[in-house]
Image (cartoon, helix red, strand yellow):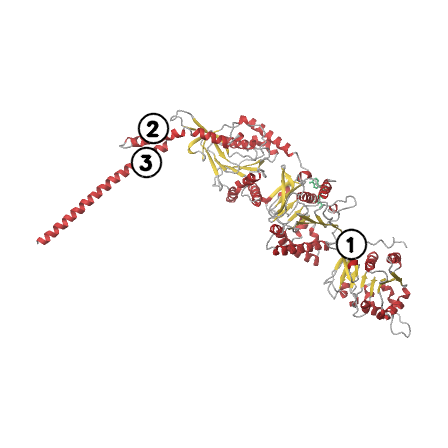
């Protein structure tokens, strides 16, 4: 029992102890809680007082009630102490702010309007205020006893967007605020340095009317209320272009570029959007946000009025309280900003007029071709790109950039819209900036006419454009010449790729860096009316397409650029089925009324005024549009003057090759003709190649069976020309006595020409034996029989061979072989023994008769004139021959060197009727 009671006593004591402890703990918790509640009450009171403002707190019943509770006087006292301390420090605050705004908003950015309104600044934009004044703010004066007013200013250009929210009936105040800001900005810089775009969802005509005098110039653009998208597209276009430019220069923003170069390259742009408090359409909103997020680094700021949205990039806010007051994110919600009073409207409008006049005067009206040219020629480097102004918009140059992002150009416009003029403006502007070591031009015009001819030396003007390596004119029927140019470019592409590979680089800029002594200019190939290349379902079209695709795709990295010009629709239709080329032409230039050059929905060319062009580096999408007035580059002596200056400056550059499809070339001027004496094996020149070089088509008269040459067709002049150049080129390679020319002419009309040739050969002291028609069978028999004992080269020049056929076929009684049989022997075996025939057959059937069954191999090479392609296939290893005869051209085929025939141009030959013995 006692044990039990002892146990109970111990338990009770323990429980008492526990209770005591618990009691203590609970007591402590209660007092802690009381303390916490008191603190909370103090903090709540503090918050109420702060919210209401310390002065106004006394008047607030709820605050007064709380303040009277025990311990709460501390709060009020403490707040008064803090405030006192703050104001002791802050006493200097307004002064500091005033100084700061004074420094950050100098001149028109912060001074009273009387100091600047109506004056035209000369600041080119190299020093830029950071802040722009909008009003003042006043700190309560009760505490300090002094009126504590300071200036309030907001950041804008390069720094921040601005979002303004109106209150009921404050639209005039908002207008005044915006007008004030814009006038400060416009008056800070030289005219033209700032462009303002105004858009108001509700109205077209009455947006900031005082600024309207500026709308005569590019400084102010008022946008149609329904066309916000156009404005956003335009801004997006500027942003892309400016970013591309600044990044290329290694700068992160236009501002950074300006600081680095000390030059302002672009105007600032401010777009003011007046909304109505309602959300924009989601698409617009998305575009607006996109623009806002990258605009500042392109020098573009937005001022949004009642456009509810959150913008990317830095944004300051101003919210109006009433007609004079606002709060702003610059000053915080506690300080009220007294907005500056509106500028007197008559003074604003006068100032705007003055700025507009100064701008117009500065722009000097329409610019001329000379304004496209730099002060000093040839100073730019083309390692990364080619960049040159081609025109002006509102006095500012509009540039064309040919480089990585826009490697090839497509130019379109109806006839007479100024395409050719544009090309001249472009060529002049480029040639004046880049030396011939930096830029090489290949110019081809398929139009009839001579539009590029002046760039090569001519009769009237001996100068040439030193950058031009090739000028092709009147090539409308010689599509093969276009093909030759493309082949040349493709070869050059391969050469450059190989060099790049050797130097382990992938583009021109790096190649030039690795190979500083190499000659790697950027190549620009201009093809006017390029659609001719694709005219016809033939091999020329097929080859041109695949070559163009290759050049268009790979030319970008190797510095080979195409500029394709055409009348719009024809040119674009030429691209049907060839999207690869079209898509690579990211630079589009649309002359007024051009169709389909820009993207489907882009109407800019429709409304472009005369002598303007829409320059678009974004494949024709609207946001890439840049309208430019193109100066007159076609008036007499405008371009030639520049050409002469450049020619004098870079005179050492070789003259370009001129290919003029309307002129017959001269044998004596052919480069191959000059090289002839250096060859050991005899070769005949049959005509000029349609190629990039001034070369000739050549047939080597090797000592193998069948190495003879036939001219086919009835075109006398061309036939005589080919016979002539064959004979004269051979004569050039032999010393007198080495060769005997056997001349037999069976065409009466040709006699004077043949005599003339014989005279020329004789003058060169070559042995010339003329054979009269009736003697031919006999003489051929003699030569055939003497073949094994031949002591010198013999060349038979046979004119009108078909006429000899009856006589050759005739057999003398008792004789086994006819003259024809001997002739066939000569054709087959003669070449092996130094006897070659160069014959002209006017009828192809007669040639077949001459050769007999299976004898076509004995004509090793031929040139066909007015003969249809279908007749030629037996002489062309049976392949289908496409040839529509055309004057002044022949189709040429050499079995030993050709896979398929090629077109040749017979050298100049006088009209046989004009040749007098
Ligand atoms: N910017 C310009 N300023 C003044 N005159 C111009 C301008 N552009 C072109 N011209 C004139 O307009 C005429 C036609 O221009 P151009 O030859 O360049 O047009 P085009 O589009 O090439 O026409 P086409 O395809 O028929 O040759 C020329 O006489 C030229 O002098």
- The mark that comes first in sequence, 2 or 1, is 2
Tell me the element at label 3. helix
**Closest to the observer: 127 or 605?**
127
The nearer-to-camera label among 2 and 3 is 3
Please name whichever residue, 857 or 290, is drawn nearer the observer in this view of the structure.
Answer: 857
| Mark earlier in primary sequence (3, 1) | 3
Residue closest to the far left: 1
Q: Earlier in the sequence, mark 2 or mark 3?
A: 3
Q: Is residue 65 left or right of residue 217?
A: left
Question: Does residue 596 lie above or below 81 as drawn?
Answer: below
Q: Position of residue 386 (x, y in %)?
A: 63, 46
Q: Is the CB atom of the residue marked by disc 1 within 8 angstroms of ligand 1's nearest atom?
A: no
- Circle 2 packing at 10 Å, graded few (<14), some (14-19), many (20+), is few
Q: Residue under circle 1?
A: 670
Residue toward you, 385 or 298: 385
Which residue in the protein does label 3 denote? Answer: 44
Q: Which residue is mark 2?
A: 59
Q: Position of residue 393 (x, y in %)?
A: 63, 38
Q: Quadrant of residue 228?
A: top right
- State the CA–CA distance, disc 3 to disc 1: 103 Å
- Which circle marks residue 108 in the picture? none
């Amino acid at each position: 029992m006692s044990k039990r009671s002892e146990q109970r006593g111990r338990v009770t004591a323990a429980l008492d102890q526990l209770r005591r402890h618990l009691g203590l703990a609970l007591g402590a918790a209660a007092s802690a809680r009381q303390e916490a509640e008191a603190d909370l009450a103090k903090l709540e009171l503090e918050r109420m007082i702060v919210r209401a403002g310390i002065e106004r707190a006394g008047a607030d019943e709820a605050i007064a009630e709380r303040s009277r509770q025990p311990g709460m006087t501390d709060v009020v006292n403490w707040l008064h102490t803090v405030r006192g301390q703050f104001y002791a420090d802050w006493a200097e605050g307004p002064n500091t702010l005033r100084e700061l705004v004074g420094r950050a908003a100098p001149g028109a950015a912060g001074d009273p309007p009387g100091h600047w309104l109506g004056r035209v600044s000369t600041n080119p934009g190299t020093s830029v205020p950071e802040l722009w004044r909008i009003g003042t703010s006043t700190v309560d004066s009760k505490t300090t006893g002094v009126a504590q007013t300071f200036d309030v200013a907001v950041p804008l250009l390069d720094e921040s967007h601005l979002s303004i929210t109106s209150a009921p009936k404050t639209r005039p105040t908002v207008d005044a605020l915006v007008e004030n800001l814009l006038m400060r900005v416009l008056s800070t810089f030289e005219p033209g340095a700032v462009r303002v775009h105004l858009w108001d969802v509700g109205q077209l005509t009455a947006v900031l009317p005082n600024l309207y005098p500026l709308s005569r110039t590019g400084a102010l653009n008022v946008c149609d209320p329904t066309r916000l998208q156009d404005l956003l597209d335009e801004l997006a276009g500027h942003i892309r272009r400016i970013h591309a430019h600044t990044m290329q220069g290694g700068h992160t923003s236009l501002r950074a570029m300006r600081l680095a170069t000390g030059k302002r390259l672009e105007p600032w742009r401010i777009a003011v959007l007046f909304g109505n408090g309602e959300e924009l359409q989601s698409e617009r909103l998305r575009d607006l946000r996109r623009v806002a997020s990258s605009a500042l680094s392109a020098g573009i700021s937005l001022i949004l009025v009642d456009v509810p949205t959150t913008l990317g990039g830095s944004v300051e806010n101003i919210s109006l309280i009433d007609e004079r007051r606002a709060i702003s994110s610059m000053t915080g919600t506690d300080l009220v900003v007294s907005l500056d009073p509106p500028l007197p409207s008559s003074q604003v409008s006068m100032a705007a007029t003055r700025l507009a006049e100064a701008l117009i005067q500065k722009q000097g009206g329409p610019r001329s071709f000379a304004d496209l040219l730099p002060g000093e020629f040839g100073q730019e480097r083309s390692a990364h790109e080619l960049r040159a102004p081609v025109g002006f918009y509102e006095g500012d140059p509009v540039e064309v950039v040919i480089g990585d992002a826009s490697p090839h150009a497509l130019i379109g416009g109806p006839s007479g819209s100024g395409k050719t003029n544009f090309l001249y403006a472009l060529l002049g502007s480029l040639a004046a900036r880049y030396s011939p070591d930096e830029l090489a031009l290949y110019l081809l015009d398929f139009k009839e006419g001579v539009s590029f001819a002046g760039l090569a030396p001519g009769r009237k003007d001996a100068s040439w454009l030193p950058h031009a390596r090739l000028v092709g004119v009147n090539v409308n029927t010689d599509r093969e010449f276009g093909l030759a140019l493309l082949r040349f470019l493709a070869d050059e592409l391969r050469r450059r790729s190989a060099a790049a590979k050797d130097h382990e680089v992938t583009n021109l800029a790096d190649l030039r860096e690795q190979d500083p002594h190499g000659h790697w200019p950027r190549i620009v190939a201009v093809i006017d009316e390029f659609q001719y290349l694709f005219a016809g379902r033939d091999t020329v079209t097929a080859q041109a397409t695949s070559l163009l695709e290759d050049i268009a795709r790979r030319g970008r990295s190797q510095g080979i650029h195409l500029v394709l010009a055409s009348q719009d629709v024809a040119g674009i239709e030429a691209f049907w089925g060839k999207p690869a080329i079209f898509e690579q032409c990211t630079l589009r230039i649309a002359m007024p009324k051009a169709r389909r050059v820009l993207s489907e929905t882009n109407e800019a060319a429709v409304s472009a005024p005369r002598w303007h062009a829409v320059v678009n580096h974004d494949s024709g999408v609207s946001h890439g549009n840049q309208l430019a007035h193109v100066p007159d580059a076609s008036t007499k002596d405008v371009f030639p003057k520049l050409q002469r200056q450049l020619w004098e400056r870079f005179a050492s550059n070789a003259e370009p090759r001129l290919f003029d499809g309307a002129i017959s070339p001269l044998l004596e001027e052919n480069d191959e003709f000059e090289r002839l004496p250096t060859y050991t094996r005899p070769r005949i020149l049959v005509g000029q190649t349609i190629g990039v070089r001034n070369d000739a088509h050549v047939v080597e008269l090797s000592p193998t069976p069948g190495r003879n040459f036939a001219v086919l067709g009835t075109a006398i002049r061309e036939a005589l020309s080919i016979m002539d150049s064959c004979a004269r080129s051979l004569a050039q390679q032999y010393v007198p006595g080495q060769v005997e020319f056997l001349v037999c002419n069976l065409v009466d009309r040709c006699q004077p020409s043949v005599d003339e040739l014989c005279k020329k050969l004789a003058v060169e002291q070559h042995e010339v034996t003329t054979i009269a028609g009736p003697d031919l069978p006999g003489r051929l028999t003699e030569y055939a029989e003497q073949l094994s004992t031949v002591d010198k080269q013999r060349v038979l020049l046979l004119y009108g061979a078909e006429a000899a056929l009856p006589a050759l076929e005739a057999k003398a009684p008792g004789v086994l072989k006819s003259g024809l049989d001997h002739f066939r022997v000569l054709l087959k075996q003669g070449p092996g023994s130094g006897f070659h025939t160069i014959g002209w057959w006017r009828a192809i059937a007669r040639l077949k008769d001459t050769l007999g069954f299976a004898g076509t191999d004995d004509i090793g090479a031929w040139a066909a004139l007015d003969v249809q392609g279908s007749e030629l296939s037996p002489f062309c290893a049976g392949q289908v021959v496409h040839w529509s005869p055309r004057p002044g051209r022949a189709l040429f085929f050499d079995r030993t060197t050709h896979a398929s025939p090629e077109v040749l141009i017979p050298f100049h030959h006088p009209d046989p009727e004009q040749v007098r013995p």
